Amino acid sequence: MRVPKIAVVGSLNIDLVMRCERLPSPGETIMTDDVLTVPGGKGANQAVAAARAGGEVSMIGRIGDDAYAPILINNLRQQKVITNQIHMTPLKSSGVAVVAVDSNGQNAIMVSPGSNATLSPEDIDDAADVIRDAELLMIQLETPMETVLHAIQIAKQTDTRTLLDPAPAPSKPTPSNLFSVDFLCPNQSEAAALTGITIRSQEDAFRAAFDLQKRGVQTVMITLAEKGVVLLDNDGPRVIPPLQVKPVDTTAAGDAFAGAFAVRVVESDSTDDAAYFAATAGAMSTTTHGAQPSLPTRKEILENCPTSNQ
Ligand code: RIB
């Protein structure tokens, strides 16, 4: 079987994960002795998710000039992600995320972008052949907006399809060409931030999806955790039902969804098939702690995917 070629432009972080009974309120200190240091970052997570789902993945990004950098690179190499286009930024720290996870698996994340903020349009030009050679480009919003837009522009010069996970939700007005992507996969709060529509139900999510489609996105998938995925493309609106799981940590569920979707949509050319595969990966990732440690393999996804005939 052919192996989908995926390029990822995005962030690499070290995640300092603390598990606690509940998330702290403003001004409150909560004690926990449950601390993990694991590789994360939305870009790196999605690269690993796509590699485990069966893709040949190249990542374009920037690490810092510190002790975390070799950990981040070696981890990606172990996961068979191609790292030739990940460069070191002198005198900068690597990205760091502080991730708090409560006993229901909900999280709150703070990110210091460090070297991720130095990923430039020139870096994208240097890696343009990798993007052109890929069948699908994955991007998120933990690197500078001008770099993200430049990567989309390079992909659009060829047949490389584009999948944007608009996370974290942009705090500034969004440039309209961000919506020229083929696939957009916001979660509930990101879809609300992009459209101004408060999302409490599938109906609200469909209104947001139509809004995003009007702006130019080909296929919108709004991930709603236990309410499934609201999907809208030229074939109309539909819901991909959730896989029933008991979540212990929702960190990187969106990354698992994006990485698995990227691989499956290239190999099957069916949006619905890819969305079922991706929703399965996203749900499965919530049953294990940590970002990258929780990302399922292709075999695990296929064993649990309701539409899979392997
Ligand atoms: O999507 C989860 C990721 O968000 C974490 O790994 C953390 O690094 C932040 O980027």
Image (cartoon, rainbow, N blue to C red):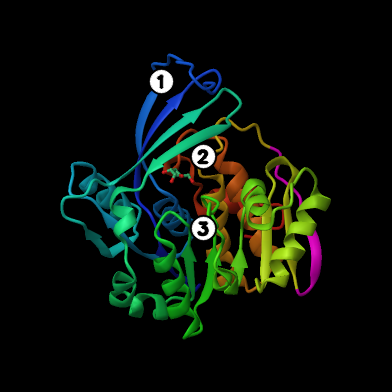
> Splitting the image into 4 quarters, where does residue 124 fall?
bottom left
Residue at 37% across / 24% down in the picture? 35
- Identified by mark 3, the residue type is Gly
Would residue 57 be found to the left or right of residue 303 on screen? left
Q: What segment is highlighted magenta in the picture? A: 234-244
Left or right, residue 220 beside residue 15: right
User: What is the spatial separation of the Cα atoms under label 2 and label 3, in whole angstroms?
Assistant: 14 Å
Name the residue that disc number 3 marks. Answer: 259
Separation (CA) of disc 1 from disc 2: 16 Å
In the rendered image, the quadrant that contains the C terminus is bottom right
Q: Amino acid at mark 2?
A: Thr
Q: Amino acid at mark 1?
A: Asp
Q: Where 198 sits versus 238, above or below?
A: above
**Quadrant location of ligand 1?**
top left
Q: Position of residue 167 (x, y in %)?
A: 52, 52
Q: Residues within 10 Å of mark 3 (few under 14, many from 20)?
A: many
Where is residue 158 drawn, in percent x and y?
47, 85
Q: Is residue 308 visible?
A: no
Residue, x 48% and y 41% (percent of image)?
A: 294
Front residue of 195/248: it is 195
Residue at 34%, 80% (x, y): give it.
129
Front position in the image: 251 or 74? 251
Point out the tag, 1 or 3, that comes first from the N-terminus.
1
The answer to which of 71 and 274 lies nearer the viewer is: 71
Upstream in the sequence, badge 1 or badge 2? Answer: 1
Marks 1 and 3, Cα distance to the nearest angstrom? 28 Å
**Residue 236 magenta-highlighted:** yes
